[in-house]
Image (spheres, rainbow, N blue to C red):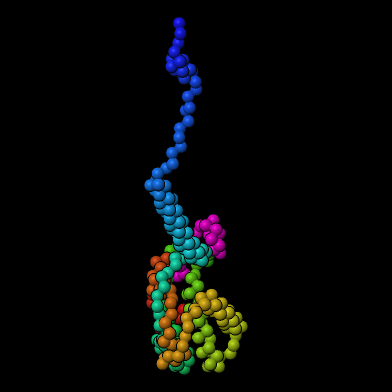
Amino acid sequence: MSISNDEDDTERQAFLPRDTRIEEKTPPETDSANWTHYKHHLRLFLEIFMAVVILILSIRSIYDKDKDMNGRSPVPIFPLKTYTFNENSKYMNESIFSSSDATLKTLHNWIELSAGSSPSRRQQNRKQDDAIGLSEPYSIEAHWTTEPVYMMSVFHQLHCLSYLVQAYQSAFAGTALTQELAHHSSHCFDYLRQSIMCAADTTLEGKTESGPGWGSTHQCKDYDALLKWANEHSVTAWRANMIDTAIL
């Protein structure tokens, strides 16, 4: 039996390996454009995201810095307020040194500039105090208990300045200098020197009709807010029944 050439070729083709390769198709131009567009937007998104992260970290760094600057004290950071420095005869005037009585009665007006009670208090927690670097508190007797208290520097500064005014009047009147007066005055002068340098008011002053130093605006802590906080954290009131020559 003979087999035709066509059948023979067909049988051979059945046993030959087939070419299973798939032709690589070049992506259409539209797909390539879409991919480029996608990469562009992805990069833009990442750049915006990184910028937002950097901005947030910068703001947090500024906040943490302010927090660290006040980290050694449980006293809050008070808002700033604009004050204009002007002469105020209620607290200081040229006749204050005319007599001891005039000095004391003028300095008596300073009492309202200080807290209306004993030094500010906070609950004593030695471990927490040590962690933020606070020194050991003072102790005073109040309400039949011993209370740990701290004095805010601003009130210490006012006391020192008031003391120096009184000491100056004594010297002006010819009162002999005592060791206690010399020691206390020396302490107050140096304490106020360091306090001024610590606050370091950088307001630029120029000529005004009011005279040197007067008429200039300063950015200061809101003193009303400060007094409010100090009075809310007081131990015991001390202004009751005061004579008109009592001073800080």
Q: Does the magenta stretch include residue 219?
A: no
Residue 233 placed where, x, y %? 42, 65
Question: What residue appears at the point 59 percent right and 88 percent down from the top-left corner?
Answer: 177
Residue 115, compared with residue 105, is above or below; it is above
What span is in magenta?
Answer: 118-135
Residue 144, compared with residue 157, is above or below; it is above
Question: What residue appears at the point 48 percent right and 30 percent down from the top-left corner?
Answer: 21
Residue 158 placed where, x, y %? 48, 78
Question: What residue appears at the point 48 percent right and 91 percent down from the top-left corner?
Answer: 97
The secondary structure making up most of the magenta span is loop
Residue 203 placed where, x, y %? 47, 81
- As drawn, the residue found furthest toward the right would be 179
Residue sitting nearer the eye, 91 or 65: 65
Q: Is residue 120 magenta?
A: yes
Residue 133's quadrant in the figure?
A: bottom right
Residue sitting nearer the eye, 221 or 51: 51
Residue 55 visible here? yes
Residue 176 placed where, x, y %? 58, 90
Residue sitting nearer the eye, 116 or 207: 207
Residue 67 visible here? no
Residue 72, compared with residue 16, is above or below; it is below
Question: What residue appears at the point 51 percent right and 75 percent down from the top-left corner?
Answer: 199
- As drawn, the residue found furthest toward the top would be 1
The quadrant of the picture occupied by the N terminus is top left
Position of residue 176 in the picture relative to residue 241 (left or right): right
Residue sitting nearer the eye, 68 or 124: 68
